Image (cartoon, rainbow, N blue to C red):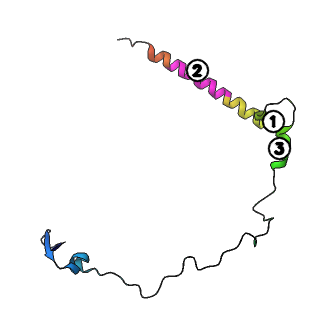
């Protein structure tokens, strides 16, 4: 036996199979025309695209390799000059400041409260 929800009595009532599977008069929609093909369009092959497209830009890897492999005694993280030095010093300052802040907070937490 099949059941459906009755909008009048707000309870389940007996029903036929078609009424149970399509409640409240809803019928399945049958498409009248076929859908468009998703993969029906042609695509470009990799050989069709020119090798020097504008989105690729200039290859900077050889220049950077020369810069970073130069034996001048400077650490790798400081090879690019002033911006690297600023980032390095800012990172070190934040690290030391955070460590000091954590130690002060730990010290304050370890002291008993006055009543």
Q: CA distance from mark 2 to mark 3?
A: 38 Å
Secondary structure category for the residue under label 3: helix
Whether 93 is among the magenta residues is yes
Q: Quadrant of residue 99?
A: top right
N-terminal of the two: label 2 or label 3?
A: 3
Q: Quadrant of residue 75?
A: top right
Q: Which residue is mark 3?
A: 65
Q: Residue at x 54, y 22 (%)?
A: 102
Q: Position of residue 66 (x, y in %)?
A: 86, 43
Nearer the camera: disc 3 or disc 1: 3
The quarter of the rendered structure image containing the C terminus is: top left
N-terminal of the two: label 2 or label 1?
A: 1
Q: CA distance from mark 2 to mark 1?
A: 29 Å
Q: Which residue is mark 2?
A: 100
- Please indicate whether residue 99 sits to the left or right of residue 73 in the image: left
Secondary structure category for the residue under label 2: helix
Nearer the camera: disc 2 or disc 3: 3
Neighbour tally class for label 2: few under 14, some 14-19, many 20 plus, Cα within 10 Å: few
Q: Are marks 2 and 3 in contact (CB under 8 Å)?
A: no
- Please indicate whether residue 108 sits to the left or right of residue 96 in the image: left
Neighbour tally class for label 3: few under 14, some 14-19, many 20 plus, Cα within 10 Å: few
Q: Residue at x 87, y 37 (%)?
A: 70
N-terminal of the two: label 3 or label 1?
A: 3
Q: Which residues are magenta?
A: 92-105
Q: Which residue is mark 1?
A: 79
């Amino acid at each position: 036996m099949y059941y459906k929800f009755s909008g009048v009595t707000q309870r389940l009532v007996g029903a036929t199979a078609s009424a149970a599977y399509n409640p409240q008069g809803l019928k399945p929609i049958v498409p009248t025309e076929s859908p468009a093909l998703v993969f029906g369009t042609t695509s470009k092959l990799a050989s069709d695209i020119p090798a020097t497209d504008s989105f690729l830009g200039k290859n900077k890897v050889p220049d950077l390799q020369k810069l970073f492999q130069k034996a001048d005694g400077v650490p790798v993280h400081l090879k690019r000059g002033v911006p690297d030095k600023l980032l390095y010093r800012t990172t070190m300052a934040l690290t030391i400041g955070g460590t000091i802040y954590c130690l002060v907070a730990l010290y304050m937490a370890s002291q008993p409260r006055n009543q």
